[in-house]
Image: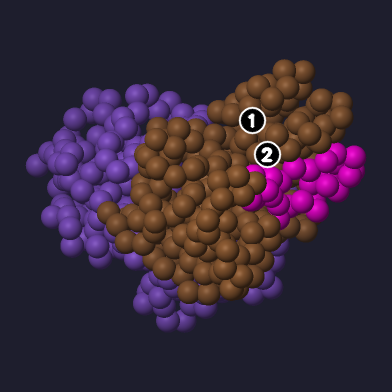
Chain colours: A purple, B brown
């Protein structure tokens, strides 16, 4: 059974575009509807209560597009509001935490896994708890890296200042002799080079967005929900605000042209 | 005529607490009601349209407290939505742009003024236009510094990485041989030491929040609206979200204990 309905993807802003990039790589014929809540970004520092309310509203935006699946392309939402989205949607919901944790559990040889993310994601212990469920023998070490998001958005991905900041954030994790590091924020794949340099390449980096795309592909196959069409798919980008430099920054995250971006009304009211 | 009604102060988040600090210094007996829109912070990168809608809602929160004056303790809002607030409020409204520009015009000897701020503030040309109105002979040079806000919130005010970032942002302004620099964002006073160091102390730094407090004092005197009571005033802090580390970061900005913070409902809906 073919299913040409779009996959719905949402994020607090533009970070989720790295997940869309991974999805288009693994599923080149799927239609995708994206929603970024750019009027209220970032979610990372905000309370769980507010993130849960925002997640419910973001879900509703996607449901209006008759999506066949919802991908929460935001670690903070996946960490604190997965149940909110699952309860609201009648379609399968995939967050980035479980796929990222599974990929890390497979990759680690010494069972010592580091996790970096926003303050919201780290404080939720979502990755730590999920890793423990997968393998109670894994030791997990967390570090919030709040400056990584603005550095990635500024495009300072190869700057001496970014390297200094990365060294400071990651130093405690190197002391713990991790062999695997979960990039628990969709912005962080842009900083892979500098993170790898600081960690001396001895650590396997896990991109949760990439792992999520693989999970989405498997789920669609299991449920016979793949789009059979081999035509160029439709990618539609919606945002609650079109902020300054949106296109420039967004295309760096997506890795291709964004095309026309729709502004969804009602998020400032 | 005495007037014990509070002064209303609002900001996109916690940055405006540096303005409250200046107000309590210059007006130690005035009651103050503060509102920080922490559920939607930051405004700096967002479009003017969204900032204007948010500013109207923030104004309404203060008006419910029967304030006698509104201080827009946010450069981005002052730059793009002063008219929105003025139209909505029946009380005097003071933004931070005009007082900051006036203080800079008085301070400059070579009539070469630099301005740093968020992307929203810089793109609005509000400081440039105001400086020109005050003195057409002044040459103004602008630089957006998006990383300064997260660095100030992280408390990295004396970090080598912050110094590198400040050097990169401020280098073009040093080439223009400015003698005065407007700190056009309420977060930046926390970075005064590092900015001064990078500029080699030859440049006068203008804190718009400080200049605004002086203007508020003058206006209250002109209008006979000062509070005659010499008792300890009531400072009430309201936010739309109580984000992670709010108290820790907020008290660093305010320079004193915050006390009880009220969450205003309805900003996540």
- Chain ID of residue with mark 2: B
Q: Which residues are magenta?
A: B189-217
Residue A31 visible in the snapshot: yes
Disc 1 crowd, CA 10 A, few/some/many (<14, 14-19, 20+):
many
A81, above or below A42, in the image: below
> x and y percent of residue B48 in the render?
45, 32
Q: Which residue is denoted by mark 1 in the rendering?
A: B127
Name of the residue lying farthest toward the bottom? A137
Q: Residue at x 55, y 61 (%)?
A: B227
**Residue B100 numbered mark, or none:** 2
Q: Main secondary structure of the magenta part?
A: helix
B59, above or below A93, in the image: above
Say whether marks 1 and 2 touch (CB < 8 Å). Answer: yes
Q: Residue at x 25, y 35 (%)?
A: A31
SS class of the residue under badge 2? Answer: helix
- Apparent side of residue B73 relative to residue A102 in the rendered image (left or right): right
Disc 2 crowd, CA 10 A, few/some/many (<14, 14-19, 20+):
many
């Amino acid at each position: 059974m073919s299913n040409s309905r779009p996959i719905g993807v949402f994020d607090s802003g533009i970070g989720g575009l790295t997940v869309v990039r991974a999805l288009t790589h693994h599923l080149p014929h799927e239609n995708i509807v994206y929603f970024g809540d750019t009027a209220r970004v970032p979610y990372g520092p905000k309370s769980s209560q507010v993130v849960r309310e925002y997640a419910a509203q973001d879900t509703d935006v996607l449901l209006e597009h008759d999506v066949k699946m919802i991908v929460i392309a935001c670690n903070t939402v996946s960490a604190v509001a997965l149940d909110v989205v699952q309860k609201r949607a009648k379609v399968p919901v995939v967050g980035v935490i479980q796929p990222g944790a599974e990929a890390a559990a497979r990759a680690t040889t010494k069972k010592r896994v580091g996790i970096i993310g926003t303050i919201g994601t780290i404080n939720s212990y979502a990755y730590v708890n999920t890793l423990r469920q997968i393998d109670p023998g894994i030791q997990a070490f967390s570090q919030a890296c709040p400056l990584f998001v603005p550095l990635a958005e500024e495009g300072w991905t190869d700057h001496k200042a970014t390297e200094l900041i990365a060294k400071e954030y990651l130093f405690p994790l190197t002391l713990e002799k991790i062999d695997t590091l979960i990039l628990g924020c969709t912005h962080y794949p842009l900083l892979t080079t500098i993170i790898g340099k600081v960690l001396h390449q001895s650590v396997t980096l896990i991109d949760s967005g990439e792992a999520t795309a693989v999970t989405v592909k498997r789920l669609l196959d299991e449920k016979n929900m793949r789009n059979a069409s081999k035509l160029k798919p439709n990618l539609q980008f919606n945002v609650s605000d079109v902020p300054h430099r949106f296109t420039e920054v967004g295309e760096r995250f997506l890795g291709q042209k964004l095309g026309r971006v729709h502004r969804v009304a009602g998020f400032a009211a």
